[in-house]
Image: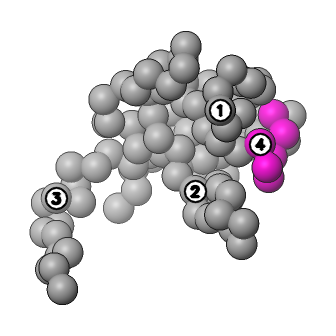
Amino acid sequence: MEDKTIQYLDFKKVDIRLGTIIEAEEYNQLKKPSIILKINFGEGIGIKKSSAQLRKNYNPNQLINKQVIAVVNFAPKQIGKIISEVLVLALPDDNNEPILVLPSKKLLNGVRLY
């Protein structure tokens, strides 16, 4: 079995931050319809866009003002006609559909996971 151990400095390279969803709209032009999110990560990072396949468990109105956790230092990725700038983190439910990773209390936008 391959050793999958990483060093702490490897983990530190992944910039995982908290942000608040300020806009959410359905995006149906993909094989698997998604929701386009605009997320405010606060001063220093600003507002970033993400395409997330959340339609099975969320509607856009439910997502407004939710705080989410995302990787903010991946290279932007073209998804259909959208450029996704951050990767919102989720865990799979029993049907392998994403459930967002959310903080249990409101925190400052831009705070870094450690």
Q: Nearer the viewer, mark 2 or mark 3?
A: 2
Query: Which residue, given by chain and number where applicable, does mark 3 sit on?
Result: 10
Give the secondary structure at mark 3.
helix
CA distance separating discs 4 and 1: 12 Å
**Disc 2 residue type?**
Ala
> Residue 6: percent from the left, percent from the top?
16, 70
* Residues in magenta, as a range: 55-60
Q: Nearer the viewer, mark 3 or mark 1?
A: 1
Label located before the other in sequence (2 or 1): 1
Label located before the other in sequence (4 or 3): 3
Residue for point 65% across, 63% down: 96
**Disc 3 residue type?**
Asp
CA distance separating discs 2 and 1: 20 Å
Instruction: Classify residue 66 as left or right of residue 52.
Output: right
Q: Is residue 77 above or below residue 96?
A: above
CA distance separating discs 4 and 3: 32 Å
The reply to whether callout 3 and callout 1 are in contact (CB within 8 Å) is no
Question: Can residue 37 be seen?
Answer: no
CA distance separating discs 3 and 1: 34 Å
Residue 80 among magenta residues: no
The reply to whether callout 2 and callout 3 are in contact (CB within 8 Å) is no
Residue for point 32% across, 36% down: 74
Q: Nearer the viewer, mark 2 or mark 4?
A: 4
**Disc 4 residue type?**
Arg
Give the secondary structure at mark 2.
strand
Query: Which residue, given by chain and number where applicable, does mark 2 sit on?
Result: 90
- Where residue 55 is drawn, which disc sits there? 4
Query: Which residue, given by chain and number where applicable, does mark 1 sit on?
Result: 31
> Residue 10: percent from the left, percent from the top?
16, 58
85 or 114, nearer to the observer: 85
Q: Is residue 58 above or below residue 2?
A: above
